[in-house]
């Protein structure tokens, strides 16, 4: 493990993917890891490895922190509905987690929103569909252009006054 906690050398960040799940996503995560390795990615599995009940924040927080800090560029989170890990990840600055239940949603999240964390609802999509969602997300680039302006506004949200003009947007 490197000092940044990811286990990734700086040159590996572009071809490396972090992945984590709670117990509900373990089987699908294993399929995704195998497919990403076949595709040539270095995969850092941040847990869990068991189908014994676990708490999704214990796995979502470390992954989101790595993406937020810049020690990793992209990650994938899985839980039963995807909602819990999505909420956790999107609390972090510079994390744009996208809950995707079909390949087209994953693609749009990359093209238009430059999502850097893919969230898959493991109990609501088949393993085959989950792998296809992941592949589409990995293969899609950000379009930039008018979308870059919007993404910049998302990333500035925590550093400016909130919608009510009182303090910062994080509370």
Image: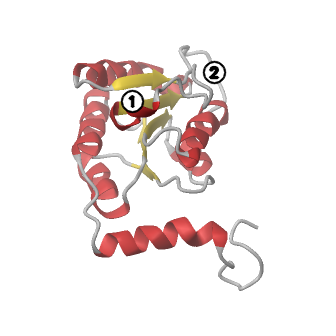
- In the rendered view, does 23 fall on the left or right side of 160? left
Cα separation between marks 1 and 2: 32 Å
Instruction: Give coordinates of residue 16: x percent, y percent.
Output: 38, 31
Residue topped by disc 1:
12
Question: Which residue is more in the foreground, 152 or 91?
Answer: 152
Q: Quadrant of residue 41?
A: top left
Where residue 122 sits: x, y (%)? 43, 33
Q: Quadrant of residue 5?
A: top right
Residue that protrudes farthest toward the bottom in the picture = 165
Residue at x 63% of width, y 54% of height: 91
- Residue beneath the point at 56% across and 36% down: 63
Could you tell me which secondary element the residue under label 2 belongs to?
Answer: loop
Above/below status of 32 relative to 91 = above
Indicate the position of residue 142 as horizontal and vertical percent values: 28, 57
Q: Which mark is residue 53?
A: 2
The residue carrying pointer 1 sits among few (fewer than 14), some (14 to 19) or many (20 or more) residues within 10 Å by Cα, namely some
Q: Nearer the viewer, residue 9 or 44?
A: 9
- Residue appearing at x 27%, y 59% in the figure: 111
* Quadrant that contains the N terminus: top right
Q: Residue at x 47, y 21 (%)?
A: 26
Q: Is residue 141 above or below residue 33?
A: below
């Amino acid at each position: 493990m490197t000092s940044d906690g990811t286990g990734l050398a700086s040159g590996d960040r572009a071809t490396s993917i972090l992945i984590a799940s709670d117990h509900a996503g373990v089987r699908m995560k294993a399929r995704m890891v195998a497919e990403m390795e076949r595709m040539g990615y270095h995969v850092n599995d941040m847990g869990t490895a068991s189908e014994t009940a676990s708490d999704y924040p214990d796995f979502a927080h470390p992954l989101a922190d790595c993406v937020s800090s810049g020690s990793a560029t992209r990650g994938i989170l899985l839980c039963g509905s995807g909602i819990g890990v999505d909420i956790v990840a999107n609390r972090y600055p510079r994390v744009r987690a996208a809950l995707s239940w079909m390949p087209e949603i994953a693609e749009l999240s990359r093209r238009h929103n430059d999502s850097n964390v893919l969230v898959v609802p493991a109990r609501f999509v088949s393993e085959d569909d989950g792998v296809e969602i992941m592949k589409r997300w990995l293969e899609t680039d950000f379009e930039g252009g008018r979308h870059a302006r919007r993404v910049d506004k998302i990333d500035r949200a925590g550093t400016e006054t909130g919608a009510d003009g009182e303090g910062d947007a994080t509370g």
